[in-house]
Image (cartoon, rainbow, N blue to C red):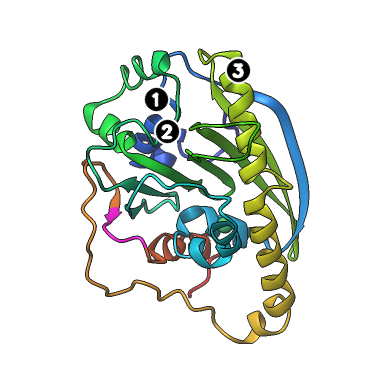
Amino acid sequence: MFATWNPDAPPLMDFLGDYAWYLKAFFELFPGGMEVYGGAHQVDIRGNWKIHAENFSGDGYHLQNAHRTMFDLGVMGEQAGAVEGFVVNVPTGHSIRAQYVVDEGTPHIPFGYEEALLAEAGRTLEQEQVKFRQRTSVIHGLVYPNLLLITTAPLYFGEDAKGSTAFTQLRSVTPIDAHHHRVTYWSLVPKDASDEWKAKSYLYSTRQHGAASYFEADDLENFRRIDAALGDQVAGTDPFNYELGEGVATATVPPWKGPGNVVHQDLTEANQRNMVRRYLQQMGTEA
Ligand SMILES: [Fe+2]
């Protein structure tokens, strides 16, 4: 449910534009719908809110470095195979990043859902939206400016939750001041999943991407240090660099066709540039 105090705001679907296609594919994979499981978690974080928003907008390149410890410790478990990634953005600032398993012979493994649910999956979606979800192991994105979403299918996360599963998480980011923001986390599960699966998905969600999770320990520390290093002095005098992937030949061709500006490349700041461009437009200033 979206609301605004702005009497001049455009209708929601105009504001979302081509991005609505991806939101539908993200939230309506299961005809029975999604529901919140486990309530909301809330944390105050040091760092400007835009750092968090940029991270979810399309930051595929930090994974192997910022979360290196998880790979070294074996926390990430067996991966489903080689993956390719790409990013999509639309002019109103929204963006999404997705990575899919290259091997076409790996059906459904990235989903991590129960067979009974998968039989119904995608029934209300277009064929290209189903393809968008089919071999996709991770999707994360930004509904500009401050609603973040992620779904991922970790394969192993400890003795108490064996096997493949998936989780879906929403976050809202609220600025507190220039150096702090508040994040609220919700875990979403398909309404028609079994109670056992919902509990397992929630465990994975909080363990991988919750407030005290493996990923969050790395990411929030990065946000804090970025703020400590750049927040007052450097950011006031030196421009940030957003050139990653600019002018680089594209390589990845996603196995689906969707709207928006599809960038056939994973290691790129195309979505961050898109977000900051929109922000500067609204602030009435130039880069
Ligand atoms: Fe991260």
Which residue ends up furthest to the bottom in the rendered image? 237
Q: Is residue 9 visible?
A: no
Q: Is residue 154 visible?
A: yes
Q: Mark 1 points at which residue?
A: 29
Determine whether 78 is above or below 126 in the image: below
Q: State yes or no: discs 1 and 3 in contact (Cβ < 8 Å).
A: no
Q: x, y percentage for residue 209?
A: 62, 45
Left or right for 127, reference 97: left
Real-space Cα distance between discs 1 and 3? Answer: 20 Å
Q: x, y percentage for residue 237?
A: 63, 87
**Secondary structure type for disc 1:** loop
**Residue 76 on the magenta segment:** no
Q: Residue 26 carries which label?
A: 2
Q: x, y percentage for residue 269?
A: 42, 66
Over which residues does the magenta segment extend?
262-266
Q: Which residue is drawn at 49% across and 78% down?
A: 241
Helix, strand or loop: magenta stretch: loop
